[in-house]
Image: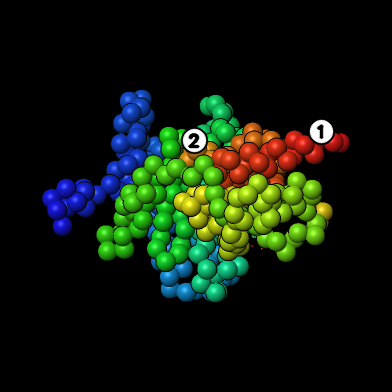
């Protein structure tokens, strides 16, 4: 190996070092965010280790949730937690309270566990609005108010993708070091893509714009090549591929599920935040996904996210439909 490559290999940018570097740009910062993130990373390392041991699904869901809730509360930096696993939000007791609200899905795609498909943890972070007694309104904020969002994918390797609002970076767990190392700096999604990702089993119930878009992917009329279909059915894995290779991931509304399937706070928002930070877009069929103001913590929304040009096409199809109405 030449000297330059060696120097790179030996200068390890761990996720902690990365966040501390970011934090040093804000002299007023007290390090609370780094502490919070360290606790999220610890939860992910734990889940990664149990997923690799092949524990059964039910246990893993519950276990992962418990680990994240305990890690977040013990960080002393959180005040409200919203988890996919818990019907109600958790309000942290005053003596252990901090200023961050964390919304998360501890183990998304868990129905795939038993067949070894990649699954993941998704999270978003808000700050309480003011110095006041925290209320649900502090988490019922539009996604554009998130300070940070990310996911950790448990697959052939364990990958942590993070945005603190200044681009997107990917870190891979080095099991021998027990550390996430920066392996995918400044991820940018290709402007156009050759892949679409959707559950086509729902096609008979789709609305006009979704059906037209997918038809165009398969039978393009402009001389371009047809797109490839890739669908894992595990959001973290489908979004991760979309982020790296470009294309579009869609979970649209349909006649049976007028609000789609995916949850606004801990699926749609974090992934939309990452897409925008990587140069892509996210749309609900009506508006920019990050502008949505949720009214319930487990609310659902349709979502179209991915390469900038692909989402532009979807937006144009919905605009044309609206004009007709
Ligand atoms: P589970 O957590 O119930 O496995 O749901 C996974 C998921 O929420 C998300 O990860 C996938 O993108 C989506 O569901 C797949 O849904 P379909 O099976 O309806 O395509």
x and y percentages locating residue 179 in the rendered image: 31, 55
Q: Secondary structure at mark 1?
A: helix
Where is the N terminus found, in terms of image quarters? bottom left
Residue at 42% from the left image edge and 44% from the top image edge: 187
Residue at 85% from the left image edge and 36% from the top image edge: 324
Q: Secondary structure at mark 2?
A: loop
Residue at 70% from the left image edge and 61% from the top image edge: 200
x and y percentages locating residue 258 in the rendered image: 79, 49
Q: CA distance from mark 1 to mark 2?
A: 36 Å
Disc number for residue 147: 2
Judge whether residue 259 can be spotted in this image: no
Q: Quadrant of residue 325?
A: top right
Q: In the image, is 71 to the left or to the right of 183?
A: right
The CB of the residue at mark 2 lies under 8 Å from ligand 1: no
CB atoms of marks 1 and 2 within 8 Å: no
x and y percentages locating residue 22 in the rendered image: 34, 35
Q: Nearer the viewer, residue 71 or 203?
A: 203
Q: Which residue is mark 1?
A: 323
Residue at 82% from the left image edge and 54% from the top image edge: 255
Report crowding for label 1: few under 14, some 14 to 19, many 20 or more residues within 10 A (C-alpha): few
x and y percentages locating residue 309 in the rendered image: 58, 40
């Amino acid at each position: 190996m030449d000297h330059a490559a060696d120097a790179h290999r030996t200068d390890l940018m761990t996720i902690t070092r990365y966040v501390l570097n970011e934090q040093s740009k804000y002299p007023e910062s007290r390090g609370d965010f780094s502490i919070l993130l360290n606790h999220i990373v610890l939860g992910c390392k734990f889940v990664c280790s149990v997923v690799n041991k092949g524990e059964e699904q039910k246990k893993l869901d519950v276990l992962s949730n418990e680990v994240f809730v305990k890690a977040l509360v013990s960080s002393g930096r959180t005040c409200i937690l919203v988890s996919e696993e818990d019907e109600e939000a958790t309000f942290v007791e005053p003596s252990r309270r901090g200023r961050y609200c964390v919304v998360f899905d501890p183990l998304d795609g868990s129905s795939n566990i038993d067949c070894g498909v990649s699954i993941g943890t998704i999270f978003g972070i808000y700050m309480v609005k003011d110095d006041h007694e925290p209320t649900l309104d502090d988490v019922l904020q539009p996604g554009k108010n998130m300070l940070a969002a990310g996911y950790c994918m448990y697959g052939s390797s364990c990958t942590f993708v993070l945005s603190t609002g200044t681009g997107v970076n990917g870190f891979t767990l080095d099991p021998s070091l027990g550390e996430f190392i920066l392996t995918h700096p400044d991820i940018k999604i290709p402007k156009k893509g050759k892949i679409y990702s959707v559950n086509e089993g729902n096609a008979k119930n789709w609305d006009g714009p979704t059906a037209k878009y997918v038809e165009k992917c398969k039978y393009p009329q402009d001389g371009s090549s047809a797109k490839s279909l890739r669908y894992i059915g595990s959001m973290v894995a489908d979004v991760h591929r979309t982020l790296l290779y470009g294309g579009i991931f869609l979970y649209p509304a349909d006649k049976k599920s007028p609000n789609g399937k995916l949850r606004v706070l801990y699926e749609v928002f974090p992934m939309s935040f990452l897409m925008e930070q990587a140069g892509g877009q996210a749309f609900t069929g009506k508006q920019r996904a990050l502008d949505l103001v949720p009214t319930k913590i487990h609310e659902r929304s349709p979502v179209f996210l991915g390469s900038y040009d692909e989402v532009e096409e979807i937006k144009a199809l919905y605009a044309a439909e609206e004009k007709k109405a």
